[in-house]
Amino acid sequence: MGWWCWNMNLRTYQARSMAEALQRVKAELGRDAVILHTRSFKRGGVLGLCARNVVEITASRATDVADLIPPPAGASAGGGPKPPVSSPVAAAGNGRAAAAPQTPSPERVVVDAPAALDCLRVEMTAVRRGLDAVLRETRLSRAPALPADLVETYTQLLSQQVADELARDLLADLHACAGDAAAVRERLRHRLAAMVPTAGPLTFGVPGRPRVVALVGPTGMGKTTTLAKLAASAKLRDGRRVALITIDQYRIGAVEQLRTYASILEIPLHAVSSPAEMKAALESLSGCELVLIDTAGRSPNDEPRLADLQALLATASPHEVHLVLASTHAESAALRAAGQFARLGADRIVFTKLDEAVGFGVMLNVLRQVGLKLSYVTHGQSVPSDIAVADAGAIADRLLAGIEGGMGR
């Protein structure tokens, strides 16, 4: 299959957050701009310490993308079939060879890989936009009986991945505010904030009775980086005596990564693999005020390793167990993880990667169903800056920003 690509006016934007980058795209290319590629990376710093998170978006005007419709297969630029082409080699030989009719050989298409990938991204973006339009119409057809201005709010709640039932509940008592945009916004913010239970920041023990806090969760959620942020904040901002324990000896480089953080922060680190080692490590760290335990990522379906982790944590007897989930995680996977890790005593939730999330509805849905309080959120890779104590009002504001951004498209 050949790919056809014309030159496009591609532009790249870099910003501190996805929202800021999207705002710049919309301001320069218009509300119908097509996003072709996104990525996030760190700039500066040492091993994430003091590094700055950067979001990069490659985009184009919608009118440029419209020119990328490929011509029909087998058609020439003029729209007709391509005429047979004589072989240059035959023409250069004797007259008999030159006069022989030439059978067209199968056309060989040389594909420019980067160009092909760009076209594929464009096609996928067009497909997504089409699906979004279909979903929007479907949602509108199923929308509850609401005033016209609230129907748009309802569809945008769904676009933020808020569950349909929850979206209906949120709007149930807004009828009296219909027609007053400011009143609707304020009431909706109040309702959203009320649905985000928060746990507050970490507390500290005293030498001889340190506060022990464990982080658990599936692989790839950002537990180790979150642990480093908590440790750096407690040591550098609060001036506390902090220590680390890691159980993550399965992932290549995990211990070395945490050891580097510990070295930079000048705090002790113990790697343990058995209940006996856990007990010895805690005894040696009794002079600290906070002990943070990093655990290996576990699949919720990995019963043997979950049982091993359960035994280690039972020995540690942590005061708090934070379940770390990415806000980019699918809701079904997040709920399954919450159910499995409940056996480890998880009593709080940390949501990571808010800077990469498309919508924040999943976070709201999960909090509502699992009954745990939100302790922290993270929004980048920089240590210790890209972490914040969970604030219900701030979460509500993020959701509203997504809703209002969608309504402005």
Image (cartoon, grey):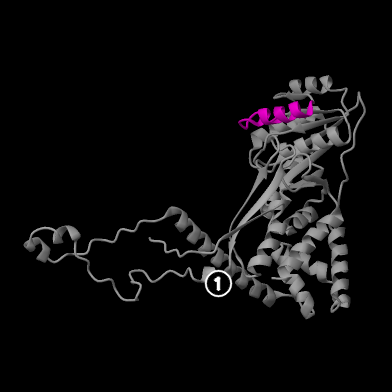
Tell which of 328 and 100 is nearer to you. 100
Q: Left or right? Give the position of 341 relative to 396.
A: left
Q: Amino acid at mark 1?
A: Thr
Label 1, on which residue? 63
Relative height, residue 408 to residue 117 (above, below): below
Residue 50: name its quadrant.
Answer: top right
Relative height, residue 254 to residue 350 (above, below): above
Q: Position of residue 57 (x, y in %)?
A: 62, 56
- Residue 333 visible to an observer of this rendering: no
Q: Position of residue 272 (x, y in %)?
A: 72, 24
Tell which of 337 and 39 is nearer to you. 39
* Residue occupying image coordinates x 53% and y 68%: 65
Q: Left or right? Give the position of 218 relative to 150.
A: left
Q: Position of residue 396 (x, y in %)?
A: 82, 59
What segment carries the magenta color?
247-266
* Residue occupying image coordinates x 72% and y 34%: 295
Residue 127: name its quadrant.
Answer: bottom right
- Residue 233 visible to an observer of this rendering: yes
**Crowding near pointer 1: few (<14 within 10 Å), some, many (20+)?**
few
Q: Position of residue 377 (x, y in %)?
A: 78, 48
Relative height, residue 4 to residue 240 (above, below): below
Majority secondary structure of the magenta segment?
Answer: helix
Label 1, secondary structure: give it: helix
* Residue occupying image coordinates x 75% and y 75%: 151
Which of the image's four quarters has the N terminus?
Answer: bottom left
Check if residue 242 falls in the magenta segment.
Answer: no
How many marks are shown on the rendered structure?
Answer: 1
Residue 129: name its quadrant.
Answer: bottom right
* Residue occupying image coordinates x 78% and y 58%: 398
Residue extending farthest to the front is 92
Which of the image's four quarters has the C terminus?
Answer: bottom right
